[in-house]
């Protein structure tokens, strides 16, 4: 029995690491957002989700795909034209739809209100993850995180998996989401916060495009079927740079998430 419990824990840990941003990333973003909520906004949104913190539901959309297949169809990635930066429509349309529906949260059925909050908290974080920014050329997806690279240990690893878990835990394997949040959301100036949260959702996604494009130039994608010995190598130095980029994106996501929650629930 004890062995079975340990086996189950190991399986669940592996499963969680496969999710978008991973548990660490999503929880860190939600916790940063929570740190910047007004007391009224925090109280109002928590009333809608059984009195729990938004951190509790940060990975809800990943963890309930089987029960809520309609939510699994929502896009967890954003597509851009690789050369022009043009944003393709579904993700931003879906997110704007959720934000607009939540503006009338007091009149929504409880079940609708909850799931829309879960979608917002989860997918808003996804849209800031460099591994969830994918690029198209002539209408076809040409740069995606679903390709292998060689990681710092010399083993092939799907780029998506690297961004969803390894990027954050590589340098700080013992850190939890609070450790990440307190380290990177520390002594931020009001001018920095104002600059990061200025603009619209579309502006923020465009910023994510600009920041994320480098991950495909620093570790170029190779054609499908490329032998492991010829794959792009993510060196220790590059992994450190990617870790810094991930932390920058988590701070931005958390601050921007807080702004929207304050605007909707802080009235």
Image: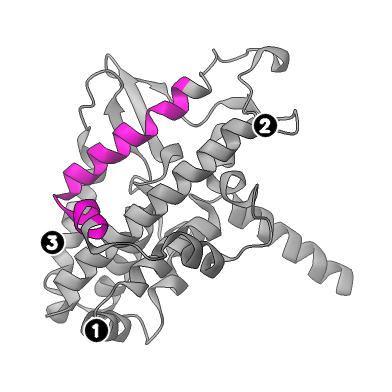
Please indicate whether residue 23 sits to the left or right of residue 39 in the image: right
Measure the C-alpha gap from mark 1 to mark 2.
Answer: 44 Å
The residue range painted magenta reads 192-217
Which residue is painted at 42% across and 69% down in the image?
Answer: 31
Quadrant of the drawing holding the C terminus:
bottom left
Q: Which residue is mark 2?
A: 151
Which residue is painted at 31% across and 40% down in the image?
Answer: 208
Q: Which residue is mark 3?
A: 100
Q: In the image shown, does 75 or 132 lie closer to the viewer?
A: 132
Magenta stretch: includes residue 57: no
Q: In the image shown, does 86 or 240 lie closer to the viewer?
A: 240
- The reply to whether the C-beta atoms of the residues labelled 2 and 3 are less than 8 Å apart is no
Asked which secondary structure carries label 2, the reply is loop
Q: Marks 3 and 1: which is nearer the front?
A: 1
Which residue is painted at 51% across and 19% down in the image?
Answer: 221
Q: Position of residue 53 (x, y in %)?
A: 40, 79
Q: Which residue is mark 1?
A: 44
Colour scheme of the picture: one colour
Q: Position of residue 150 (x, y in %)?
A: 67, 26
Q: Marks 1 and 2: which is nearer the front?
A: 2
- Residue 70 visible within the image: no
Q: In the image shown, does 214 or 75 lie closer to the viewer?
A: 214
Asked which secondary structure carries label 1, the reply is helix
> Earlier along the polypeptide chain: callout 3 or callout 1?
1
Which residue is painted at 27% across and 13% down in the image?
Answer: 138
Q: Residues within 10 Å of mark 3 (few under 14, many from 20)?
A: few
> Earlier along the polypeptide chain: callout 2 or callout 3?
3
Q: Position of residue 109 (x, y in %)?
A: 21, 78
- The reply to whether the C-beta atoms of the residues labelled 3 and 1 are less than 8 Å apart is no
Measure the C-alpha gap from mark 3 to mark 1.
Answer: 17 Å
């Amino acid at each position: 029995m004890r062995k079975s419990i340990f086996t189950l824990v190991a399986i669940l840990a592996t499963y969680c690491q496969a999710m978008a941003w991973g548990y660490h990333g999503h929880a860190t973003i939600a916790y940063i957002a929570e740190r910047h909520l007004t007391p009224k906004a925090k109280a109002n949104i928590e009333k809608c989700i059984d009195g729990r913190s938004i951190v509790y539901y940060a990975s809800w959309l990943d963890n309930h795909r089987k029960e809520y297949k309609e939510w699994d169809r929502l896009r967890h990635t954003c597509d851009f034209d690789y050369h022009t930066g043009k944003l393709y429509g579904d993700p931003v349309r879906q997110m704007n739809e959720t934000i607009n529906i939540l503006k009338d949260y007091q009149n929504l059925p409880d079940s609708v209100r909850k799931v829309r909050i879960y979608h917002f908290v989860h997918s808003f974080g996804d849209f800031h993850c460099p591994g969830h920014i994918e690029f198209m050329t002539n209408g076809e997806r040409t740069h995606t995180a679903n390709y292998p690279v060689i990681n710092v240990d010399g083993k092939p690893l799907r780029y998506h998996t690297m961004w969803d878990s390894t990027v954050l835990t590589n340098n700080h394997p013992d850190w939890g989401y609070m450790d990440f949040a307190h380290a990177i959301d520390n002594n931020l100036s009001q001018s920095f916060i104002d600059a990061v949260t200025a603009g619209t959702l579309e502006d923020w996604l465009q910023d994510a495009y600009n920041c994320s494009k480098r991950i495909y130039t620093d570790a170029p994608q190779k054609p499908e079927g490329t032998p492991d010995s010829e794959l792009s190598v993510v060196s220790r130095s590059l992994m450190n740079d990617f870790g810094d980029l991930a932390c920058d994106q988590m701070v931005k996501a958390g601050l921007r998430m807080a702004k929207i929650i304050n605007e909707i629930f802080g009235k």
